[in-house]
Image (tube, grey):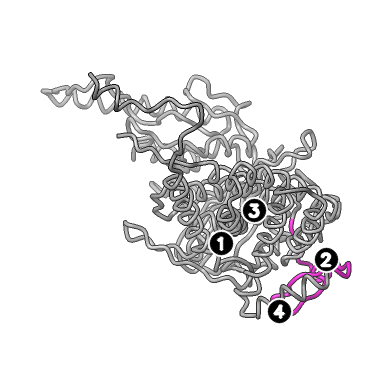
Amino acid sequence: MAAVTASQPRSSKTESYVDNKRKEDIRQANIKAARSVADAVRTSLGPKGMDKMISTANGEVIITNDGATILNKMEVLQPAAKMLVELSKSQDAAAGDGTTTVVVIAGALLKQCLTLLSHGIHPTVISDSLHKASSKAVDVLTAMAVPLELSDRESLIKSASTSLNSKVVSQYSTLLAPLAVDSVLSVVDPAKPDMVDLRDIKIVKKHGGTVDDTQLVKGLVFDKKASHAAGGPTRMENAKIAVIQFQISPPKTDIEQSIVVSDYTQMDRILKEERNYILGMIKKIKATGCNVLLIQKSILRDAVTDLSLHYLAKAKIMVIKDVERDDIEFITKTLNCLPIANIEHFRAEKLGHAELVEEVSLGDAKIVKVTGIKDMGRTTTVLVRGSNQLVLDEAERSLHDALCVVRCLVSKRFLIAGGGAPEIELSRQLGAWSKVLHGMEGYCVRSFAEALEVIPYTLAENAGLNPIAIVTELRNRHAQGEINAGINVRKGQITNILEENVVQPLLVSTSAITLATECVRMILKIDDIVNVR
């Protein structure tokens, strides 16, 4: 009994000493893991950044320098490092561009936090100061921004090409940037002028040709050929298009069962019934004046049989089969028609109208184009071409980033300079602000200001310039009041970046800073990892 009482802790008025070493170790381990992820993508920042070759487990190879793609494919096991992967995903969702920037900023902030922690500043104090600094940073950026009108197509193209300049397909930015701007502007709904749904822009990839052959199609493109069975038509003018979700084939029993037919007359009757059944369906379709059929892929049984294709060809109806279920919504919105789920509901008012539906040869493959659609919905299709799959995939990712940049400008119509100019200006102004603050706060804000210099530093480093000389010169220029002085990577010197047409949406910079700060604050607050089996 005495032994039990002895083992209980002594209750004293003062707190006994608790060992904090483990908590510090865990915090440091988290920060180191997250920083190693940030260092992995740091070299791919900016127009002269390097590309990463990602080899997946199933032997697929991806070449990209899009931060979100690189991190997405990385097998990250450490929980804190996973947060950086999520961080780049959320930047991709919020702004679409700046996915590398956001991770690099987070890495630099974590590095500064390590120094502050080693000086004995409490994590909560650092966290609160970071929050204050980030809100101040957003105000500074907003004050620097230049307002923009959507009618100013030139500025929109400039910002889209800035986004494309850091990609593998940067030499095609003169073609892809206007294409991205036109496609976004064509899907903006006047009723909701600051909302753009990128699902209304469909990107169809087709192997063959070069990226130069990429085009914007006002209409629909199907990445498949029309059905050639029984010599059906492959070109149709004044098309009346039906999107059907039922099967034009003989019905099956509801349950798995086999029917045994003993004599030939019975067999003939079955075949005759099948023919009549299909003919009856096709007559109903023909009666509405429909001459192009888009048939949804069917899971239960064949959507069309050879027999039905033969009758459809005789009725001069063009058939495009195996339309994916996910595409139905986009197709019906574009054609301004309704999908038809049952033959009994097949009516003329549910059809879409187009001037021309034709099959076009592209190299060794064929596609079906629908153009001149009557009362077309606000959608558009981009046909991307490329010499191999790697180029095609990277062109699609780059185009997505450019579309996101234009979308950012539609929702928040402000432009800001690129080339490390906003970051240095922030660093300068926050540094000045930190001198006004008292106590630990000022110290933490100054560290935040220093961390932002990582962007111009990395830009200069990746371009093979002397980073220390460039960043010092840049600071000097900003101190003299040149707000838009930035690193011109092409010339290897510091120029007014707005005149060089290096611009980006305000939303990209503000969301990068707020998201990075949020992520770092979260990592700071963690002091223990508990494994639950």
Q: Which mark is residue 469?
A: 4
Disc 2, SS: loop
Quarter of the rendering containing residue 176:
bottom right
Q: Is residue 51 left or right of residue 275?
A: right
Disc 1, SS: helix
Q: How many marks?
A: 4
- The residue under the point 55% across, 55% down is 118
Mark 1 to mark 3 CA distance (whole Å):
17 Å
Q: Is residue 9 visible?
A: yes
Mark 4 to mark 2 CA distance (whole Å):
18 Å
> Where does the magenta region start and end?
479-504
Q: Is residue 185 left or right of residue 466?
A: right
Residue hosting label 1: 395
Q: Is residue 399 magenta?
A: no
Mark 2 to mark 3 CA distance (whole Å):
38 Å
**Dot 3 surroundings within 10 Å: few (below 14), some, or many (20 or more)?**
some
- The earlier-in-sequence mark between 2 and 3 is 3
- The residue under the point 34% across, 40% down is 306
- The earlier-in-sequence mark between 2 and 1 is 1
**What amino acid does circle 1 point to?**
Ala
Q: Is residue 484 magenta?
A: yes
Q: Quadrant for the C terminus, please.
A: top left
**What amino acid does circle 2 point to?**
Asn
Q: Nearer the viewer, mark 2 or mark 1?
A: 2
Residue hosting label 3: 217
Q: Quadrant for the N terminus, please.
A: top left
Q: Is residue 399 visible?
A: no
**Dot 4 surroundings within 10 Å: few (below 14), some, or many (20 or more)?**
few
Residue hosting label 2: 484
**What amino acid does circle 4 point to?**
Ala
